[in-house]
Each structure stands twice: as C-alpha cells, then as structure tokens.
Amino acid sequence: LKEWLSLALKNPVEVIEKVIPDEQDLIEATLIELVDECHCDMVLTTGGTGPYPRDVTPDATLNVADRIMPGFGEQMRQVSLHFVPTAILSRQVGVIRKNSLILNLPGQPKAIKETLEGVKDEQGKVLVKGIFSAVPYCLQLIDGIYIDTKPEVITSFRPKAARRENVEK
C-alpha cells in the first residue's frame, strides 16, 4: 500500500503502519486510535474480510463507524469479480468515522492493486473504475483536504466545481 500510494498520489503523505492480529477488539481499538488520536484522514486495512470465523475486520470497522459508505464495498466486489468468482464472499466495507475514511481492502497485494486501480484492458484503458478514483473527492467532502492522483496510475474524479488548479495538502 505504501509503495502504491507513493506511485499514485501527487501529494506527499505520511503513512502510519500497524500490523495487528485478527482480533476484533484490537482492530476496533487500532481504528479508533488512528482516527481519534493520530487524526489520519484515511485508514486502509488489508485482509480479514472473508467468511472465515476469524475474518472480523469488517465487523470491527462497522462497530467504530459513524456512517457507512456502501458504494466502496460494492465497487470492490464488482472489480474483484472480473478476476475471481469468489469475490462475492468478500465482506469489505467503507465507512466514515469522524473526519476519516476507513476502507477494508483485500489481503493479497495483487488484489489490493486491482481494487484500487480497477479493471484495465491490455492497452491500460480502464474498463471498470477502481475505488481510488473516488477517494480524493470523498476526502475533500469529508474534511476539505485536497489530494490528487497521477493519471498514469489512477485518475481521480471530481465535479468541475470541486477541482483546484494547484494541488494543496
């Protein structure tokens, strides 16, 4: 994720990395810490989103959420269905807690990249948009921060009225 973000974002970002076990109380506490104490604008989790009894990341995420953003989970499954039929088993969610966007991503690096960037043909043309095309505008709406992406990796979408000529942090 850190490498992908460095390739995809025009803005510099600070990354806080946490590796924790699949324990719901610990996941909830970590999400709360990252949002409430560290003031992260976005929290990306990886893995723990399937039907296994130990896959509790979506449950923890929903428990700390103020608002659910169902489109993110729907789009992640839509993208993944182009690669694997088991995408329907995913319970990935997107939520807002305070002024932070929390997204549950798949656990495999290849699937993370596909989910973020979308489905592309052999020439690199996007056939199905990845979720990250909506993330910069979502963050702008939530808390007014303005980030932008490098179009050679992922093109972010904003209505014309929400675009700025100069990217600010």
Image (cartoon, grey):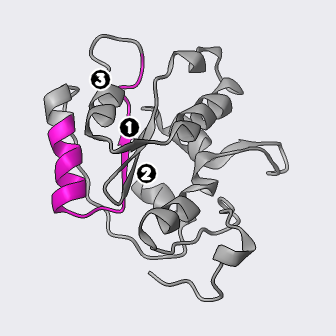
Q: Residue furthest bottom?
A: 166
Give me the disc on residue 1. Answer: 2
Give the structural element (helix, strand or loop) at label 2: loop
Measure the alpha-carbon separation of dots 3 and 2.
20 Å
Residue 80, image x, y percentages: 63, 29
From where the camera sits, is residue 103 visible? no
Residue 141, image x, y percentages: 51, 65
50 over 80 or under it: above or below: above
Give the magenta range.
28-50
Which one is closest to the eye, mark 3 or mark 1?
3
Residue 98 falls left or right of residue 105 = left
**What residue is disc 3 on?**
56
**What residue is disc 1 on?**
46
Residue depicted at x 56% and y 83%: 167
Q: Are marks 1 and 2 in contact (CB under 8 Å)?
A: yes
Q: Are marks 3 and 2 in contact (CB under 8 Å)?
A: no
Name which of mark 3 and mark 2 comes first in the sequence. 2
Report which quarter residue 166 is drawn in: bottom right
Which one is closest to the eye, mark 3 or mark 2?
3
Report which quarter residue 52 is drawn in: top left
Measure the alpha-carbon separation of dots 3 and 1.
12 Å
Which one is closest to the eye, mark 1 or mark 2?
1
Residue 120, image x, y percentages: 76, 44
* Residue 133 colored in magenta in the image: no
Residue depicted at x 67% and y 43%: 118
Measure the alpha-carbon separation of dots 1 and 2.
9 Å
Question: Around disc 1, counting alpha carbons within 10 Å, would you say few (fewer than 14), some (14 to 19), or many (20 or more)?
Answer: some
Q: As rendered, which of 161 and 24 lies closer to the eye?
A: 161
How many marks are shown on the rendered structure? 3
Residue 115, image x, y percentages: 58, 40
